[in-house]
Amino acid sequence: MPTLLLVRHGRSTANSSGVLAGWSPGVDLDQEGREQAAALAARLAAVPLARVVCSPLDRCRQTVQPLLATRPELGPADLDERIGECRYGDWTGRPLSELAKEPLWRTVQDHPSAAVFPGPEGESVAEMSHRAVEAVREWDTRVAEEHGPDAVWLACAHGDIIKAVVADALGLHLDLFQRISAEPASVTAIRYTPLRPFLLRLGDTGDLSSLAPPPAPPGDGARQQSDAVVGGSTGA
C-alpha cells in the first residue's frame, strides 16, 4: 500500500507570537517557516511523490509551494478542508497563555475526546479527528488505485490533525493523542496495509531519503506488506 507523508506546516506568525491561529485569515509563514519550507523540498528530493494534498489554509499552501516548484509534474496541490485546522471557535486568535487559564483547557489536555470548542464555529476534537482520518484513508485508497501500492504521497496539515491521524494509526484512544508531538515542518510517515497501519516516522526533521519505495518483495506481497518484522526492521 502507499506511504503517506504527513507534513506539518512550517512555523507561522501565529506560532512565533503564541496565538491560536485556527482558521484565522492572513496567518503566513514567518521567516523561519519559509526557510523550513525551502529545506523540505531538499529533504524530499530523493523521494518520488505521486500526489500532494494540502489544507486550504495559507500556511500549509506556502509550505508546499517550494516543493511543488521543483516538481512541476505534480501540478497544483489538491486542497481538502477535512485536513484543515481544528475549528477552535471562540478560542481562535486568542493568546495561548490566556487560553491556558480557561476551564476547558484542562479538558483539552486530559480528556480531549470530550472537548468541544465554544461558539457557533467551534467543533469537537472528536469531530476533527473523524474528518481527518476519513480524509487521509480515502486519499490513500485513491492513490493506490491511480499510482499503485508502492506510491508515496504527501499531505500538508496541522499539528492537531497529524496527532489525531497518528493516534488512529497506532490504535490509541483519542484521549492519548496529546502524548504525540508534531513540530513545524516535520514529516510523519504512515503506511496503511490490508491488516494494519505502520508508523514509519514520527515528527522527523532530518533526512528522508530512506522513505523512497524499496524493491518489491518476492512471494505474497500483500501479506508481507502487512507483516511486522520479527525482531525489528533490518533497515533495508
Image (spheres, grey):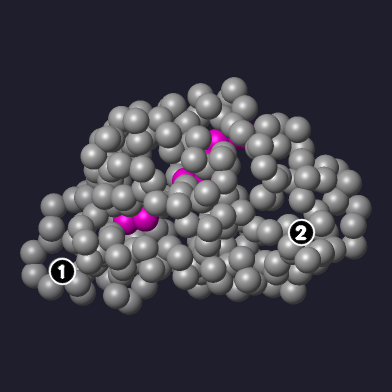
Residue 125 shows in this picture = yes
- Residue under numbered circle 2: 89
Amino acid type, mark 1 = Gly
Local secondary structure at mark 1: helix
Q: Which residues are magenta?
A: 3-12
In the rendered image, residue 76 lying in the magenta stretch gets the answer no
Local secondary structure at mark 2: helix
Q: Principal SS element in the magenta part?
A: strand
Placement of 26 over or under 162, stated as above or below: above
In-image side of 232 versus 158 (left or right):
left
Between 77 and 47, the residue placed more toward the observer is: 77
Between 231 and 56, the residue placed more toward the observer is: 56
Placement of 5 over or under 169, stated as above or below: above
In-image side of 224 versus 153 (left or right):
left
Placement of 112 over or under 154, stated as above or below: below
- Residue under numbered circle 1: 221
Amino acid type, mark 2 = Gly
| Residue at the image point whose x is 61% and y is 54% from the top | 85
Circle 2 packing at 10 Å, graded few (<14), some (14-19), many (20+), is some
Q: Position of residue 49 (x, y in %)?
A: 28, 46
Which of the image's four quarters has the N terminus? bottom left
